[in-house]
């Protein structure tokens, strides 16, 4: 590299356009700034003002240290490791994050996933019913206080904590706007509510339908419950649920999104009761036709000798998918 005698530009430095007020006493008060072709950010508070070198301006300028909120909303996810960042450490973390409201709009906590493939790694102990309940108690305590102070819960345990603790999933209103749905917070409650709401709508069912579906260990009780209710209201639709134990990742992983075709084949071969296997879309990668183990839905269908139908993720869409097709009209059975 050829030496030029000039100091390199600071890659973290940006030159921006600034709108400012000139006070009667000669002071300059910056109001907002904008990067080229970017959004404008309002300056909430000037923290410090001092003279500083300004190569861009040619000599000396004035440096302002400003506080800018910028309207950025932050939704946080905490990954908890048993005995490390739960308990009092969790309380401290929640307290620190709540100092950043309203910028921090929601905080979720999920348990660290622990598989059997941890040779030479730091020892992690999976959460059990007792320790999961302790996490729930802390999260709900802080959430109740947020509800009282801010009118919004802000802090939400993921569904997995309730399942591990053997506690019921909270009602729909607990999750408010479902800000943390993608992190598995309220997903089961929303799925059940949408599924049952769809069953309450009038459907004209043509013929009978029989199929198999697969799910992970965590969602299995809920899926069994929903399929039983579907059959009760529409006896011509019969769905057999197969709970897949995740051996591919070494156990201790119960979410449906990490189920692989390898485990489906090993645990369903010769056990299917129909010619159609329903696979939740959440089990597939973004391409929507390939599992995490690189086996495609076509390869799965060929191996099991059935048609594979990808089922929508939302409860309402899945209920509609299960009520499709047939030959003759049958009426829904009322309670």
Image (cartoon, helix red, strand yellow):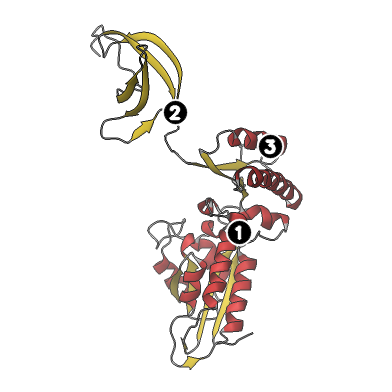
Q: Give the percent coordinates (x, y) of residue 41.
A: 37, 32
Task: Say few, some or many: other residues with alpha carbon within 10 Å of mark 3 (under 14 / 14 to 19 / 20 or more).
Answer: some
Is 242 left or right of 163, judged from the image as shown? left
Res 251 seen here:
no
Q: Residue at x 59, y 35 (%)?
A: 97
- 141 or 219: nearer the viewer: 141
| Residue bearing the label numbered 3 | 91
Answer with the quarter of the image where residue 200 lies: bottom right
Q: In the rendering, at what x and y percent does residue 19 appear?
A: 31, 25
Q: Secondary structure at mark 3?
A: helix
**Which quadrant: the N terminus?**
top left
Q: How many marks?
A: 3
Q: Residue under label 2, please give it.
A: 44
Q: Residue at x 46, y 56 (%)?
A: 293
Q: Which residue is mark 1?
A: 173
Which residue occupies the foreground of this view, 329 or 37?
Answer: 37
Residues 238 and 123: in front is: 238
């Amino acid at each position: 590299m050829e030496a030029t005698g000039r100091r390199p530009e600071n890659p973290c430095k940006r030159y921006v356009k600034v709108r400012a007020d000139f006070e009667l006493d000669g002071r300059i008060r910056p109001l907002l700034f904008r990067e080229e072709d970017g959004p404008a950010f309002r300056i909430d508070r000037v923290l410090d003002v001092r003279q500083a070198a300004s190569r861009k301006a040619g000599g000396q300028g004035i440096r302002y240290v400003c506080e800018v909120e910028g309207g950025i909303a932050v939704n946080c996810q905490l990954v908890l490791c048993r005995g490390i960042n739960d308990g009092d450490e969790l309380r401290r973390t929640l307290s620190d994050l709540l100092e950043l409201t309203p910028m921090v709009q929601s905080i979720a906590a999920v348990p660290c996933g622990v598989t059997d493939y941890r040779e030479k790694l730091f020892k992690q102990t999976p959460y059990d019913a007792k320790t999961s309940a302790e996490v729930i108690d802390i999260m709900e305590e802080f959430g109740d206080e947020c509800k009282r102070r801010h009118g919004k819960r802000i802090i939400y345990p993921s569904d997995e904590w309730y399942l591990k603790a053997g506690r019921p999933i909270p009602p729909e209103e607990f999750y408010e706007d479902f800000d943390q749905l993608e992190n598995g917070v309220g997903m089961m409650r929303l799925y059940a509510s949408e599924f049952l709401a769809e069953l309450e709508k009038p459907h004209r069912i043509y013929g009978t339908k029989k199929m198999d579906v697969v799910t992970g260990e965590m969602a299995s009780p809920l899926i069994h419950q929903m399929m039983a209710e579907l059959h009760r209201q529409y006896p011509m639709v019969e769905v057999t649920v197969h709970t897949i134990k995740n051996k591919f990742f070494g156990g201790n992983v119960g979410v449906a999104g990490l189920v692989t075709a390898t485990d489906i084949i090993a645990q369903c071969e010769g056990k299917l009761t129909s010619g159609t296997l329903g696979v939740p879309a959440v089990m597939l990668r973004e391409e929507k036709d390939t599992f995490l183990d690189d086996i495609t839905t076509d390869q799965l269908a060929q191996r099991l000798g059935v048609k594979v139908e990808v089922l929508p993720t939302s409860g309402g869409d899945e209920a509609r998918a299960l009520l499709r097709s047939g030959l003759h009209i049958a009426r829904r059975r009322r309670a």
